[in-house]
Amino acid sequence: MRPGAVALASLSLLLLGAAPAGAAGAPPPLPARMRDTGGGTQLVTAVAARTGSTSGTVTWWDRVGGRWVKAGSASARFGAKGLVEGTKRRQGTSTTPTGLYDLPFAFGTGAAPPGTRYPYRAVRQSSWWCEDNDSRSYNRWTDPRPADCRAAESEHLVSYPAQYAHALVIGFNYRTPVRGRGAGIFLHVNGRGATAGCVSVPAADMRRILRWADPARGPHIAVGTTGGATAVTRY
């Protein structure tokens, strides 16, 4: 989802609800209050105060000894039109889809940070993310861009050297793409303001996340609001 663009948003969310206090009166960590965390031992949570918010917090967690432990956190930016339930999202609305998603691979215009374990694709002049609903490559990295994927309907990744210095693909609408739902949703470096639907964090924090993330531990990202229900839509 190219950094820029604008349109509509709305609707309610799904995920991060209240929970009983722990023995010492403090609430359990956020992942412990979720019905589904993806089954792995790493999790990223991207949380906004409400559906209309364009900012919030990204936190990354490790499951250690049967408990979730916070590994780090950063300020986050969301879509310019807020957040919307992933199954109800429409392409071009500048909304961030809520739900639970895997993180298929990393990429960047810069070299992978030292210690990165994720599969990492270097952005080249020929690298595109196809967002053309009529293309067989819809919501896929293409290098080079195929003939049936119109440039005007896609994202030339090299055109965003700051935002895509380092990024992780969010598996929204990725495994079995639904045309018109949206394409190119990433966790990437901050631009000048809200995103066109992605989640973004400061550059140093994006590098920290890439050094932390271990695909062998099955990391997922959960996107939602603090006032959402406890159910999570999983993709």
Image (cartoon, rainbow, N blue to C red):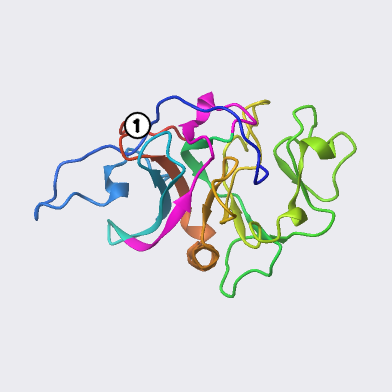
Residue type of the residue flagged with mark 1: Ala
**Residue 43 at x, y = what percent?**
42, 52
Q: Look at 54% across and 39% down and name the residue there.
A: 80
Extreme-left residue of the structure: 24
> 60 or 52: which is nearer to us?
52
Position of the N terminus by quadrant: top right
Residue occupying image coordinates x 84% and y 35%: 150
Outermost right residue: 147
Residue 188 % position (x, y): 58, 55
Quarter of the rendering containing residue 112: bottom right
Residue 235 visible, this orientation: no
**Left/right of residue 40 with respect to residue 137 in the rendered view:** left
Q: Residue placed at 52% from the left, 45% from the top?
A: 102
- The number of callouts visible is 1
Q: Residue furthest bottom?
A: 114
Magenta run includes residue 193: no
Spot occupied by residue 123 in the image (x, y as percentages of width and height) = 75, 59
Residue at figure coordinates x 27%, y 56% from the top left: 66
Task: Give, as a single range, the part of the protein colored magenta.
Answer: 70-93
Does residue 116 appear left or right of residue 217 in this picture?
right
- The answer, for residue 71, to whether it is visible in the render is yes
Which image quarter: residue 119? bottom right
Residue 44 in the image: x percent, y percent?
A: 43, 52
Q: Residues within 10 Å of mark 1 (few under 14, many from 20)?
A: some
Query: Tag 1's secondary structure?
Result: loop
User: Which residue is identified by label 1?
Assistant: 231
Residue in front for this viewpoint, 71 or 96: 96
Residue 131, above or below 43: above
Q: Is residue 88 magenta?
A: yes
